[in-house]
Amino acid sequence: MVEALLAIGVAVAVFVGFNIGGSSTGVSFGPAVGSGTLSKTAAAALMSAFALAGGWTVGRNVIDTMGGEIVPSSAFTLAASVGVLFFVGLALLISNTFGVPASTSMTAVGAIAGLGAATGTLDADVMLRIVGWWLVAPVVAFWICAVVGRYFYPYLDAAFAIDRSAGGVVEFDGVRPTVAPDATGREVAGTAAVIIIACYMAFSAGASNVANAVAPLVGNGSVTASQGVLLASAAIAVGAFTIARRTLDTVGNDLTDLPLPAALVVEVVAASLITFLSGIGIPASLAVSATMSIVGLGWGRATRTTTLGDAVSGAVDGALRGDGERTDRGRPEVSVDALAADRPDADDGVPRMGEEHGDELLAEELFDPGTTGRVVSFWIFTPTISFVCSYALFAVVPL
């Protein structure tokens, strides 16, 4: 009976890891794929390698937190572990079916919290610390990228803009990749930077998410931490090569149209936040941080045509023009060139704060509000489903 339960537990852990691969690959490599830097197959291969590296190193801290601190290790009987992992996988499967990058860590913690609430073993202090970081991390991601978008991104865009050559950056001479003859040095450097930082995101995804698949099994001693990391990483790789294609489209193409400089900003901010949180043992969501980075960058870029106060309030009444004359503009359509805008005509290639120029685009064109709303709704929906189902099971059937 114990061996049968263990086999089921491993199978469910693989199922969870498979769905993690589908979700996290889109978040990690969506900007790179959306900007045309990588193919989906190349993204999946890199995701597999660097997720393993992240889980093997920093990810062990998150395994410790989820495997014995939210609830004690004694609460993770083999049957309970199977139940927790099943609800995590179910919620993630629903999310991936709709092509939305789910908050894997929030979903897993929700299922574990459901077990703790039902059995009276939930450590409220640990849970509050985790939830506190969940609230802080997306706000930090948003405002870092908003500041970059408002004050620094135009300079980055002007200095590091890359005009893509028609034939791409890499060509294959038989089976050997070579740099395309039409590719510029700037294009090659920018492409390399995006790939390196996407791999950094994959590392952070592995650090945060490997625990979500195997922490209950490690907590009850069914597998060692090293065995758990290898098992989860293999399952993530399978998901990366299969169901990740839909989330790559959502993050890379539907959520926003990211040029290379924007992709670099988003990836650096999101990956750094998650690597930091994983290092202190907090199971945090790469999906949340990456998406809020995209939205923050777009919002900051959109508000360059207003003062800081007007950008926050969202209204400009009787704005003063340069000649001192007032004009009633009402609530503005906050508009600037998109993240991939044409180069402005200013001497340094950057418009001055408060200036408008060229073809104006509405703020909504910087990121898709409908897709953003769909992503945010699933952040709430999936952990709620995992918590409710987990609580109902363990309250009715003690395992």
Image (cartoon, helix red, strand yellow):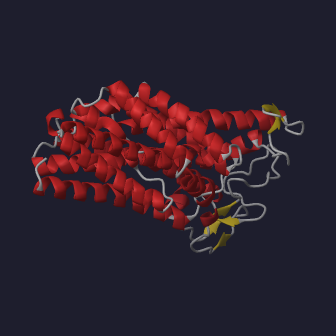
At horizontal 46% and vertical 56% (from top left) the residue drawn is 96
- Front residue of this view, candidates 331 and 161: 161
Circle count: 0
Give the farthest residue toward the right. 181
At horizontal 78% and vertical 43% (from top left) the residue drawn is 162
- Front residue of this view, candidates 351 and 192: 192
Q: Quadrant of residue 95?
A: bottom left
Residue 315: give x, y in percent of width and height.
53, 68
Residue 179: give x, y in percent of width and height.
82, 33
Left/right placement of residue 53 relative to residue 175 reads left
Residue 9: give x, y in percent of width and height.
28, 42
Q: Quadrant of residue 46?
A: top right
Left/right placement of residue 125 relative to residue 154 reads left
Depicted 368 relative to depicted 101: above or below: below
Depicted 15 relative to depicted 76: above or below: below
- Front residue of this view, candidates 287 and 54: 54
At horizontal 12% and vertical 54% (from top left) the residue drawn is 397
Left/right placement of residue 151 relative to residue 238 reads right
- Front residue of this view, candidates 169 and 371: 169
Left/right placement of residue 88 relative to residue 221 reads right
Quarter placement of the N terminus: top left
Residue 307 visible (yes or no): no
Residue 174 visible (yes or no): yes
At horizontal 25% and vertical 45% (from top left) the residue drawn is 82
